[in-house]
Image (cartoon, helix red, strand yellow):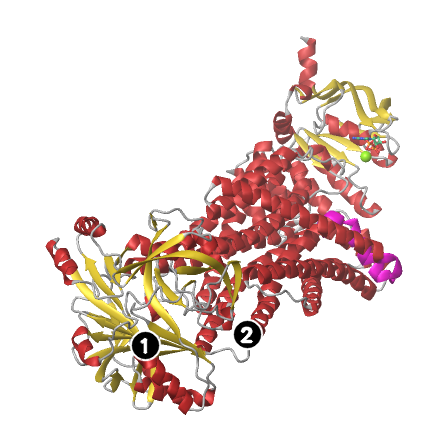
């Protein structure tokens, strides 16, 4: 009880001392980073979960490129299940002279079986949930689509050969992420209108689906009953499968974000440990005094624990506020990327972050405070009487345990945890050595400089260990910032430059065989080069070397996905110019032997395919088997039509085929496209420029968000600097006063201190620039397959930013010492 | 029978107290076989040149440290038989300190600094008692000030108030005027002797100021860690 009173009484004033503020800031930063990331991942998680539940708009979705035979919906009805049917395909929609590509979704009564469709009664109006589907003769169209064609509610849209009236603005449909929809705005129309539209020709790129939903047991029974009887052309998607990939992606994003938070956390831990040592050291005299006045060890510990708890609570409070604010900012940045109308995340992230803060304090601050208990009371008479240093085993054990506890949540698997901790230890040790090296170099360079610099540089090397820690802490934060600003734009720019100026910027898809000649003539008539037309046949792979693709083992998930998804096949006599033969041989021009196939390199690796393997495909009711004759590398950036799987001529003859083509269309030629799609309504034009723009936008936003998370890392780096300066502030104050007493002018003292920080900043900048360069090179070469170009600006900006940030933070951390008066030398006793 | 009588009177006893410390040059004896008895209410000056071992002796007498050999019996308790918390308990009950460099807790104000030993000893009316004694040392209007806002003399007054607050059986003072100018120092000593008289405390005063020592009842002289004389002071 007395301990509580005493702890509370002194706490208010302790709060004003520098080291307690730093300790508090470090805890708050850790909590802030964790809550912000916690909120964000919570949102991503919820968005994914919600999508997974609704994404099928059903419990089971039977998909096919052909109409799903009626027997299956009858069978489902026999199990007491509800059914609905959908058809979707891309097509151009007109309003007067304006046109735009849309994802047409033809739906039958009952759609959607799961989730709700939402519409608004005016463009950008309030959205509401609706029952039912558009009446015959009416459509619900996405606001973007309406905006693109300049139409509004009540206007007529031409779709194929018919005109339909817009009766509502479509704002949400549950299965909007399936298929082509993610790129083109959607339009919902009633199945009753489809036969008149003339949009459904043979080989059209239509996806048919039978939606099934109902009682869970009945759904499972039905699913089992149909498994072995379904034709190869029909694929069943259940919720679990469909959400798996999304979950994996979300999971990866969440782990990445958690790891960035962990980085802030580790730096905060360093700051906590440093400032706790200083805190303990500063309280040693008070503890010795209290013990001389009769305080017991228990009392001393109780006071330390109570104050630690108070600090933790305060840190959690401040940190949660920071976290809430950061989350607000992040969700604004990401407003289009993640569902923003989700319920606010609960307090769970705050609870988790609070737990982490306490672990942080216990692991990194407690050892120093516990040691206070052993302060000899003799210290009141002999100032050099110190408690024995805490056992290294205890300190490193506790901090290791704390790190493990903190990381475990983001990693979630003991083996990974061990790997990660070893990795962190190795990297930290390496970085520390680099830091020491830089500090050593700084020390060596001090003979050739003026008195202020010499004083500053001498200080850097005198406090070698702390200096190295500061260099690394700051360097880490800077590295990531450099990576996300300069390097990102460098990479995007580099990628853009590798794109051929004359590279095609439009794709034409879904050209019917009987239209190929006429389309070629159309371009010729308009004074354009006739593009080449590449055949496309939709198929499914059924077996590899006689083994079903479902049962086969794959080197990785991408390979499984590749083999099991619907495949686009093509055939050609000559290899495309944008391909490069890696293995095997290309078939002769006039080859007419048994079917051969050429596989794209990465797909071959992912699916574990080699030359000589036999692939069997199911195409429009027939089976085609082909032997792998070659493996190719594809330059996707050429924007030529390219395929993972290409067969020899003749293998796919007589199969339903459409053609695709790509071409460069200048802005002033775009009007011609309207005529083209008017004349051939089933042809879809895809504007790559717009898509690239969209992709770039997504990358920009995502990296902005990640950057916001990394601001915490930088802030934690600043906290480390503050902690380090704090721990030497008495020394610095005394030295400044001494220098002034010896006749140094205030300016000289100021310059000396700033020289020290400038040197630290240079070292941190060098470390960061080197780190960012290495990482950029890895990313460029491994991820983007771009040659890495050395960017001298990176180093200039890195070092300048390092000097600027460290000097500013250092000035605030050390201003008390800089301003010390000469008379302070004489003032000692408290 | 006689022994009991003596031990009732004797508040502090040193029995062949020695202290050795290890140094790079080997073991160093800084106090050797010092013995004496001090009766309740006595005021004793410990004098000697700098480095004679005065502070070391004081630390041992107050149980801040343990002798390498010999015993210290403080208020009936053999300090060598107690652990650290046990010795802390003895100090809380019966010891007060005044130091050369004041040693106030910087995060507590004057009143709270005085309350500290009262609270540690578990006294109920700590605040009222502390206020009374703060007034006695002449800091009635300064009680809410923090150490950093007080002059050296004022800090030492707070320290004295704190030392007397618990009405300790023995008050240890280690060169209490060492950090003060001579006038302030004289005022402080005046205050201390006055409080000592009125509260009938035993005073152990370490000083190298001969005139201060002369105002005590008795004088112990140390030199090179040995007790070289133990004499009554003629008033
Ligand atoms: N723990 C210790 N380690 C080494 N030397 C010590 C220690 N404690 C005291 N001394 C030495 O013992 C001698 C007596 O010290 P002290 O009692 O402080 O003297 P005084 O207070 O009389 O000036 C000094 O020379 C001092 O340096
Ligand atoms: Mg001394």
Which quarter of the rendering shows the C terminus of chain B? top right
Above or below B166: residue A134: below
Tag 1's secondary structure?
A: helix
Q: At which x and y percent is residue A60?
A: 24, 57
Badge 1 crowding class, 10 Å Cα cut-off, few under 14, some 14 to 19, many 20 or more, is: some
Residue at image coords 83%, 47%: B181
Mark 1 or 2, closer to the camera: 1
Tag 2's secondary structure?
A: loop
As measured in the structure, the alpha-carbon distance from the residue carrying label 1 to the one carrying label 2 is: 30 Å
View quadrant of ligand 2: top right
Contact (CB < 8 A) between labels 1 and 2? no
Does A120 lie within the magenta span? Answer: no
**Which mark, by number, is residue A513?**
1
Protein chain holding label 2: A
Would you identify the image quadrant in which residue A764 lies? Answer: bottom right
Q: Give the residue number, with chain letter if any, for mark 2.
A: A499
Instruction: Decide if residue A743 is on the left or right side of residue A787.
Output: right
The residue at the far top in this view is B1
Q: Is mark 1 within 8 Å of ligand 1?
A: no
Above or below B156: residue A681: below
Q: At which x and y percent is residue A53?
A: 29, 58
**Which mark, by number, is residue B142?**
none
Q: At which x and y percent is residue A819?
A: 76, 61
Above or below A429: residue A738: below
Residues in magenta?
A446-467
């Amino acid at each position: 009880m007395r301990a509580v009173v005493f702890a509370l009484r002194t706490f208010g004033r302790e709060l004003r001392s520098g080291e307690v503020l730093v300790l508090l800031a470090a805890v708050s930063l850790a909590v802030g980073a964790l809550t912000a990331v916690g909120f964000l991942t919570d949102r991503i998680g919820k968005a994914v979960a919600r999508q997974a539940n609704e994404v099928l708009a059903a419990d089971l979705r039977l998909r096919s490129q052909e109409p799903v035979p009626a027997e299956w919906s009858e069978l489902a009805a026999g199990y007491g299940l509800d059914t609905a049917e959908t058809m979707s395909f891309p097509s151009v929609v007109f309003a007067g002279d304006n046109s735009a590509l849309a994802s047409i979704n033809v739906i039958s009564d009952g759609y959607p079986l799961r989730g709700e469709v939402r519409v608004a009664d005016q463009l950008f109006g309030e959205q509401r949930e609706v029952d039912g589907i558009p009446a015959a003769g009416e459509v619900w169209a996405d606001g973007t689509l309406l905006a693109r064609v300049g139409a509004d509610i009540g206007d007529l849209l031409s779709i194929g050969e018919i005109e339909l009236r817009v009766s509502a603005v479509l704002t949400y449909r549950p299965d909007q992420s399936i298929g082509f929809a993610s790129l083109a705005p959607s339009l919902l129309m009633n199945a009753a209108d489809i036969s008149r539209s003339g949009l459904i020709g043979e080989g059209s790129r239509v996806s048919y689906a039978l939606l099934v939903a109902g009682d869970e047991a009945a759904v499972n029974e039905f699913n089992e009953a149909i498994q072995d009887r379904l034709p190869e052309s029909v694929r069943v998607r259940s919720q679990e499968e469909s959400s798996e990939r999304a979950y994996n992606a979300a999971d990866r994003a969440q782990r990445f974000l958690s790891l960035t938070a962990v980085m802030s956390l580790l730096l905060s831990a360093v700051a906590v440990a440093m400032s706790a040592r200083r805190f303990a050291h500063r309280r040693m005299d008070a503890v010795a005094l209290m013990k001389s006045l009769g305080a017991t060890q228990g009392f001393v510990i109780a006071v330390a624990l109570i104050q630690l708890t108070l600090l933790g609570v305060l840190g959690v409070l401040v940190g949660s506020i920071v976290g809430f604010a950061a989350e607000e900012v992040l969700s604004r940045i990401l407003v289009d990327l993640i569902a923003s109308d989700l319920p606010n995340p609960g307090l769970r992230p705050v609870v988790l972050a609070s737990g982490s803060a306490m672990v942080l304090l216990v692991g990194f601050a407690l050892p120093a405070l516990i040691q206070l208990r052993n302060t000899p009371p003799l210290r009141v008479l002999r100032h050099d009487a110190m408690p024995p240093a805490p056992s290294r085993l205890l300190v490193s054990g506790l901090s290791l345990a704390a790190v493990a506890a903190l990381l475990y949540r983001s990693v979630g698997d003991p083996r990974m945890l061990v790997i990660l901790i070893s990795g962190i230890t190795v990297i930290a040790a390496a970085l520390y050595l680099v830091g020491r090296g830089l500090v050593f170099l700084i020390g060596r360079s001090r003979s050739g400089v003026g008195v202020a610099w010499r004083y500053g540089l001498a200080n850097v090397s005198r406090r070698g260990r702390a200096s190295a820690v500061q260099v690394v802490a700051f360097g880490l934060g800077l590295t990531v910032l450099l990576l996300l600003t300069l390097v990102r734009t460098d990479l995007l720019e580099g990628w853009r430059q590798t794109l051929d100026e004359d590279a095609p910027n439009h794709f034409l898809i879904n050209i019917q065989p009987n239209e190929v000649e006429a389309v070629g003539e159309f371009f010729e008539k308009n004074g354009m080069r006739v593009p080449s037309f590449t055949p496309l046949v939709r198929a499914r792979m059924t077996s590899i070397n006689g083994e079903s693709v479902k049962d086969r083992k794959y080197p990785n998930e991408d390979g499984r996905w590749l083999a099991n998804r619907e495949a686009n096949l093509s055939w050609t006599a000559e290899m495309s110019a944008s391909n490069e033969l890696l293995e095997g041989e290309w078939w002769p021009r006039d080859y007419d032997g048994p079917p051969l196939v050429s596989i794209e390199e990465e797909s071959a690796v992912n699916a574990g395919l080699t030359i000589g393997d036999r692939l069997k495909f199911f195409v429009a009711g027939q089976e085609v088997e082909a032997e792998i004759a070659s493996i190719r590398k594809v330059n996707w950036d050429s924007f030529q039509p390219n395929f993972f799987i290409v067969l020899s001529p003749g293998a796919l003859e007589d199969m339903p085929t459409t053609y695709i083509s790509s071409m460069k269309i200048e802005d002033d030629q775009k009007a011609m496209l309207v005529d083209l799609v008017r004349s051939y309504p089933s042809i879809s034009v895809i504007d790559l420029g717009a898509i690239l723009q969209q992709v770039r936008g997504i990358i920009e936003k995502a990296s902005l968000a990640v950057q916001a998370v990394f601001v915490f890392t930088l802030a934690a780096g600043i906290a480390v600097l503050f902690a380090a300066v704090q721990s030497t502030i008495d020394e610095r104050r005394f030295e400044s006063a001494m220098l002034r007493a010896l006749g140094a002018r205030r300016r000289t003292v100021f310059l000396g201190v700033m020289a020290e920080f400038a040197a630290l900043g240079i070292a941190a900048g060098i470390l960061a620039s080197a780190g960012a360069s290495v990482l950029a090179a890895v990313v460029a070469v491994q991820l983007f397959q771009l040659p890495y170009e050395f960017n001298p600006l990176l180093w200039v900006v890195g070092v300048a930013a390092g000097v600027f940030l460290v000097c500013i933070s250092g000035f605030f951390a050390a201003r008390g010492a800089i301003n010390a008066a000469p008379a302070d030398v004489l003032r000692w006793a408290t | 029978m006689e022994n009991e009588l003596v031990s009732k009177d004797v508040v502090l006893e040193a029995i062949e107290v020695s202290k050795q410390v290890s140094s790079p040059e080997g073991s160093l004896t800084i106090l050797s076989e010092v013995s004496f008895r001090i009766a309740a209410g006595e005021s004793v000056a410990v004098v000697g040149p700098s480095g004679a071992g005065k502070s070391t002796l004081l630390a041992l007498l107050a149980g801040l440290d343990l002798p390498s050999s010999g015993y210290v019996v403080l208020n009936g308790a053999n300090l060598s038989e107690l652990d650290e918390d046990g010795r802390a308990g003895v100090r809380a009950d019966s010891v007060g300190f005044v130091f050369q460099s004041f040693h106030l807790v910087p995060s507590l104000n004057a009143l709270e600094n005085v309350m500290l030993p009262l609270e540690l000893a578990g006294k109920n009316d700590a605040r009222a008692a502390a206020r009374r004694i703060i007034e006695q040392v002449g800091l009635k209007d300064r009680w809410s000030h923090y150490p950093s806002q007080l002059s050296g003399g004022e800090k030492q007054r707070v320290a004295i108030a704190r030392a007397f607050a618990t009405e300790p059986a023995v008050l240890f003072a280690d060169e209490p005027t060492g950090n003060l100018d001579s006038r302030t120092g004289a005022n402080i000593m005046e205050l201390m002797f006055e409080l000592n008289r009125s509260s009938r405390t035993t005073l152990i005063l370490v000083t190298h100021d001969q005139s201060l020592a002369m105002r005590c009842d008795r004088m112990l002289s140390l030199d090179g860690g040995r007790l070289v004389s133990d004499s009554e002071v003629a008033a």
